[in-house]
Image (tube, helix red, strand yellow):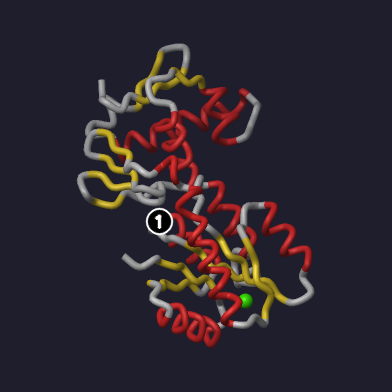
Amino acid sequence: MPDNILLVEDEAALRMTLGDRLRAEGYGVDYAATGDEGLDKATRLPFDLVILDVMLPGLSGLRVCEEIRAAGLITPILMLTAKGQTTDKVAGLKIGADDYVTKPFDMQELIARVEALLRRAPARSAPAAEPLSFGSVRVDVRGTAVTREGQPVSLSAREFQLLRYFLEHPGATLSREQLLTDVWGYSSAMFTRTVDVHVAGLRQKLEPEPRHPRFFITVQGLGYKFRPQGA
Ligand code: CA
C-alpha cells in the first residue's frame, strides 16, 4: 500500500501542483483547504504524514498541529511556513511538528523531507504495531482510527486520548484525578465530572450495552478500570 499523505493548504494552485507531484512520486494524497477540514480528516482518517500550511483560514496550522498531538496521534507533521516567520517554525516544532520547509520551496527539497519523515515513522510507532482490539472494537495500527463491528466510530480528540490511556493501562484501577492529570493535564479535582462525561461518551460509542458496561468499568469510590476481555 502506498503511503497516504494529507495535504492541508488553502492556496488551490499550490495544492494542485504539490498534490500532483506527490502522486507522481507514488503517494496517495488527500486534501483539505481549511484548518478545520484538515483537523477533522487528520483525526478521523489514517494518514502516514500530514503536510500542514501555517497560514490557513479558520484554525491556523499551528492550532491544527497542536490539536492533532492533543488527540494522541503521532503521525509525522511537516509544516509549510512563510519566509521570515521564524517564530512559526519554533512554535511549530515546540507543539509537535516534526519538520518544516519555508515557502517558496524547491519541490525536490520538499520530497526529500517527506521521504525522510516517512522513513523515520515506523520506528516511532513501533510500540503500537499490533492492532488493539476488545470486544468488536478495533483500534488501528497507528491508533488513528477506531471501528466497531467493522464500522468507523467517530470519537472526539479527548475521547480518543482517554481511550488510548485506558488501552495502555488494562486492568488497572484509575482514579478520576489520575485520568484528569494524565489525559487532560489538569490537576484540579474540580473537573472530575469531565472524566465521567467522557467515559460515558466512550461507553455510548464502544460498549454493546452502554448502560451495563463490560469494558469501561466503574470502580465504586475509586474511579474506572478498562477490562480488555470484558466483564
Ligand atoms: Ca496559506
Q: Is mark 1 within 8 Å of ligand 1?
A: no
Describe the element under mark 1 as helix, strand or loop: helix
Which quadrant of the figure has residue 29?
bottom left
**Picture coordinates of residue 221 (x, y %)?**
46, 12
**Picture coordinates of residue 200 (x, y %)?**
39, 32
Quarter of the image with the N terminus is bottom left
**Picture coordinates of residue 17 (x, y %)?**
50, 86
Question: Is 221 above or below relative to 96?
Answer: above
**Type of the residue with mark 1:** Arg
Question: Is 47 above or below relative to 162?
Answer: below
Residue nearest the viewer, comparing 110 with 190: 110
Residue at the image position 46 percent from the left and 28 percent from the top = 196
Image-based side of 44 in relation to 33, left or right:
left
| Ligand 1 lies in quarter | bottom right
Question: Is 57 above or below relative to 218?
Answer: below
Residue nearest the viewer, comparing 34 with 118: 118
Residue labelled with disc 1:
44
Image-based side of 226 in relation to 161, left or right:
left
